[in-house]
Amino acid sequence: MNIAHRGSGPRRGPACPPPSRLGRLADPVALHGTAFGRVLRGKVVLVLAMVVLSVVHDLVLGPRLVAALAGAGNPGPSAAARVAALRRRTAHLARINLGLGLLVVAFGLMLGRM
């Protein structure tokens, strides 16, 4: 008996939807009307928000913090206050990004169970 040809029809894993549902998912207009499409759209929005926050961190807050740290060698309360404020903003941004990442994982789990 040839094991490679056992069974009838093509192999489908648990992640592949049945052909009847695949037709609706392939149509972008019909996709947005389904629960799967709404969850997928939410996940994409969360990922885009994470990318925007990462860009803000890398291109805005990071350089400002480096400049503030370079100027922190000068005595004065304003330089230290500026460094502290930028560190708080950076930490806050990291916490938001972590929360968004956890939501992306949750949305991925929801998509896998649909």
Image (cartoon, grey):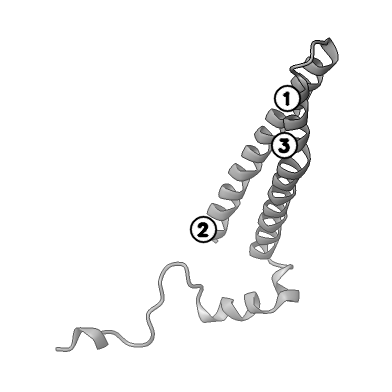
User: Residue 9's x, y, as percent?
Assistant: 37, 87
Q: CA distance from mark 3 to mark 2?
A: 39 Å
- Label 1 element class: helix
The residue pinned by badge 3 equals 62
Q: Choose the circle earlier in sequence order: 1 or 2.
A: 1
Q: Which residue is mark 2?
A: 113
Circle 3 SS class: helix
Q: How far across and how far down the image is residue 68, in percent?
A: 77, 26
Left or right, 76 with respect to 102, comes to: right
How crowded pointer 2 is (Cα within 10 Å; few <14, some 14-19, many 20+) is rated as: few
Horizontally, residue 33 falls left or right of residue 78, namely: left
- Going by the numbered disc 1, the residue's amino acid type is Leu
Quadrant in the rendering for residue 98 = top right
Residue that protrudes farthest toward the left in the picture = 1
- Residue 108 image label: none
Q: Earlier in the sequence, mark 3 or mark 2?
A: 3
> Which residue is tagged 1?
69
Q: Earlier in the sequence, mark 3 or mark 1?
A: 3
* Residue drawn at point x = 73 percent, y = 47 percent: 55
Q: Where's residue 105, x and y in %?
A: 56, 49
**How dense is the environment of label 1, judged by Cα within 10 Å: few (below 14), some, or many (20 and up)?**
some
User: Residue at (55%, 61%) from the top-left corner?
Assistant: 114
Residue at (72, 36) in percent of width and height: 62
